[in-house]
Image (spheres, coloured by chain):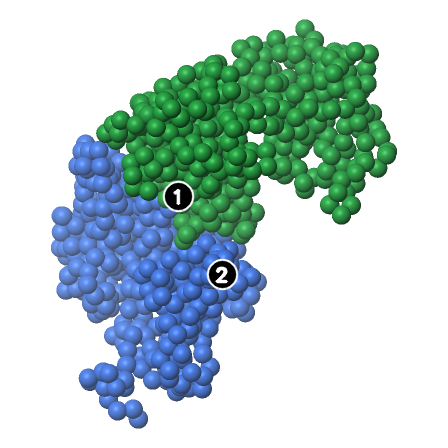
Chain colours: A green, B blue
Amino acid sequence: MNSPFTNGIAAQRLDADALAENFSDLHAPLDGHEAAVAADRCYFCHDAPCITACPTDIDIPLFIRQIATGTPDAAAKTIFDMNILGGMCARVCPTEDLCEQACVRELAEGKPVEIGRLQRFATDTVMAKGVMPFVRAASTGKRISIVGAGPAGLSCAHRLAMLGHEVIVYDALPKAGGLNEFGIAAYKSTNDFAAREVDWLCSIGGIEIKTGMALGADLNIDDLIQDFDAVFLSVGLGGVNALSIDGDDKEGVEDAVSFIRDLRQASDLTALPVGRNVVVIGGGMTAVDAAVQSKLLGAQSVTIAYRRGRDAMSASRYEQDLASSFGVNLMFNAQPKAIHGNGTAAEIELEYTSTKDGKLSGTGETVRLAADQVFSAIGQTLTSDGGLKLDGRKIAVTNTGRTSRDGVWAGGDCASGGDDLTVTAVAEGRDAAIDIHETLMGSN
Amino acid sequence: MADLTTDFLGIKSPNPFWLASAPPTDKEYNVRRAFEAGWGGVVWKTLGSEGPPVVNVNGPRYGVIYGADRRVLGINNIELITDRDLFTNLEEIKRVKADYPDRAIIVSLMVPCEEDAWKAILPLVEDTGADGIELNFGCPHGMAERGMGSAVGQVPEYIEMVTRWCKQYYSKPVIVKLTPNITDIRKPAAAAMRGGADAVSLINTINSITSVNLDTMSPEPSIDGKGTHGGYCGPAVKPIAMSMVSEIARNPETSGLPISGIGGVTTWRDAAEYITLGCGNVQVCTAAMTYGFKIVQEMISGLSQWMDEKGHTSIQDFKGKAIPNTTDWQYLNLNYVAKAVINQDDCISCGRCYAACEDTSHQAILMSDDRVFTVNDDECVACNLCVDVCPVEDCITMVALEPGTIDTRTGKVVQKEYANWTTHPNNPSATAAE
């Protein structure tokens, strides 16, 4: 048995009970009475700002009123109408930046209606019953392929299946779910929720998932266009940006995405190694998730080093404070310069930065932190563009997901426009599905 | 500090907060606890005639209406009068009164409408030393089916007759408790007065079914699958009760008749409102049944603070002060013109005023693309709905137009002079203004 003070990268820093406690549900679900009280705080605003703030346009006041009046199943239907992954979004949405930020009670009292937790209450109620509240329309005879079984792909697949189409969803990884399954912190999706949600979503019928099929390797656009009536690409951003500094090849330097994925797939957390002194480079949710989970695995010291100021961090202030509450150090205006150590990382050298006229530059002053494990979380990249026109580093799409090629739509993180959020991906998948349907059925 | 001492019909109590005749005052144990908690008086739970006492149901007696967070807004009950032996009650009353001479104890009574029945019980009550009696002509359930309670209260002649008997066979004050389950409360009040009543108390509970169980199709509270109407009380009934109190206070025939106000008194403010409408004191039940006897402490401190702030040294200072301002619709000033004004600093942009006005009223609130809500004076009739539905206190207010300014809705100049419907040109029976 090791401890947080064990040097190097080691497993079993905490015992199994402590780990189970650390990785339990971060925010416990509301019980019936709590939900009723929370729901009663909603003012049922006219043309509510929370709806506008929701990328999937869920009718939030309506579903909350449905909870308040004792009909959570109806509430869930209202949510799923717009967002079939409403269960996961209730867990991972940065509600503090979206619906709850827009809530008039946030403005009035600094205490918004707990929209996210109420959404979870409603969606959990229906999903626990195993009820799929939608039925498929009569078969259209159309077949659509989707590449990427993440939030965008699953959302698109469900809507197309509901409209009567046959859908085949390919995914490069061995399990469906995308970032829901591999990319978010374990304590946000406990009890295998992501996998259960995929099964539930597919229970509408008409969706076939084929794993281990990657675009560019096992699949190519031309064949898909040939074999299907339409193609939807939701391949995400499979590549990770490298640190590209001296010493980045040393043992102990890893990408945060892999760490999070391994943690999510681990069957025994006591077998998962983590450093004594962990430094995470980056400023997004991946950085926060990697840092917090390192701490929860038993790392003694965890620091997030971000090259710009706090306000520029893409992780919300809420998430920053959450990380701080677990004991993660937040270090701003510091960029990685080099990693030192004899074959194995021992220290990271950081250089302070300043921003002048919007341009970031190093000040020349450096600092060294003990670091036996360094996670890089400085962004992800598209690995295969399928030969489509790009907008910057993503596939260029219209607001309904049309790409430069007829018959090919795209959405989610791989496509241009929108934030890289689960909820945004769901909206893009849904809207592309509707456009595909209208295109194929001749009403557009 | 304000003096809360109350003299009601010559009955002194340290404050105007009495517990109404109801479950909380059914026995010595409860009443002693109430007095220890600070209640100024109690009306002992209604006694019936000598003999085998009434029986109550053995299932639920109460139904409820909830507000947010299971806040009790209204309770209905199907409990009858005391189901304990008459003499047990009388002995307890005597003991408690002896121990608490400074508190008011009134004995509520309900016996058949026969002179002998009253003649029999009144000397027994007199012997307890209690300060007075209250005639229960109000309970709308159970006992009414046997010709008592509200069955008496709904027939003014019976009220007058029984009251007269009580004045004849009992030496202390007689309070007549009225049922609200009638069309015109002034009639039973006047009948009580004719019979010699020293005061009326109102309201008793209102006929009600609080809810229906949608699984069993039974009204609640349900006794083995069947329910019956019960008596409704609590905060929900206060507006009805206050209107009835004001009717009696304003009626020339009963003007000056002492009133004990009952119905949804939950805070000091409710009590103060009842007193401004002419009540000499108030009686409380549901609030105590919801929160326990301790709430009287807030009522005492709250009323005391408000009286100090307003410079009232005694209850008499503000008793009945709202009666002159309670009038008939026909005498309201039709030349008074107000408009809603939204304070943009306080507005949280929920849009409830807009939805209410646009969908259900006068389309007098405008909404901009960036959710700024403003009043269109050209359409605003000052109905007050926006004020009522706004979740922010004092964000929307009604502001009177100065005489001489133009009401842009009507295009007319606001007149300084008072003018009401009785002289309005649209009134076919208008009399010429003098």
Mark 1: which secondary structure? Answer: loop
> Callout 1: residue from which chain?
A
- In the rendered image, residue B9, in percent from the top left (x then y), is placed at 36, 65
Above or below residue A223? Residue B67 is below
- In the rendered image, residue A7, in percent from the top left (x then y), is placed at 76, 12
Identity of the amino acid at label 2? Val
Above or below residue A349? Residue B304 is below
- In the rendered image, residue B256, in percent from the top left (x then y), is placed at 33, 72
| Labels 1 and 2 positioned on one and the same chain | no
- In the rendered image, residue B174, in percent from the top left (x then y), is placed at 28, 61
Number of marks in the image? 2
Horizontal side, residue A365 vs residue A243: left or right: right
Quarter of the picture holding the N terminus of chain A:
top right
> Callout 2: residue from which chain?
B
Above or below residue B72? Residue A409 is above
Q: Quadrant of residue B273?
A: bottom left
Spatial separation of the CA atoms under disc 1 and disc 2: 21 Å
Label drawn at residue B372: 2
Horizontal side, residue A412 vs residue B357: left or right: right
Label drawn at residue A59: 1
Please name the residue shown 23% across and 65% down the image.
B185
Is residue B352 visible to us here?
A: yes
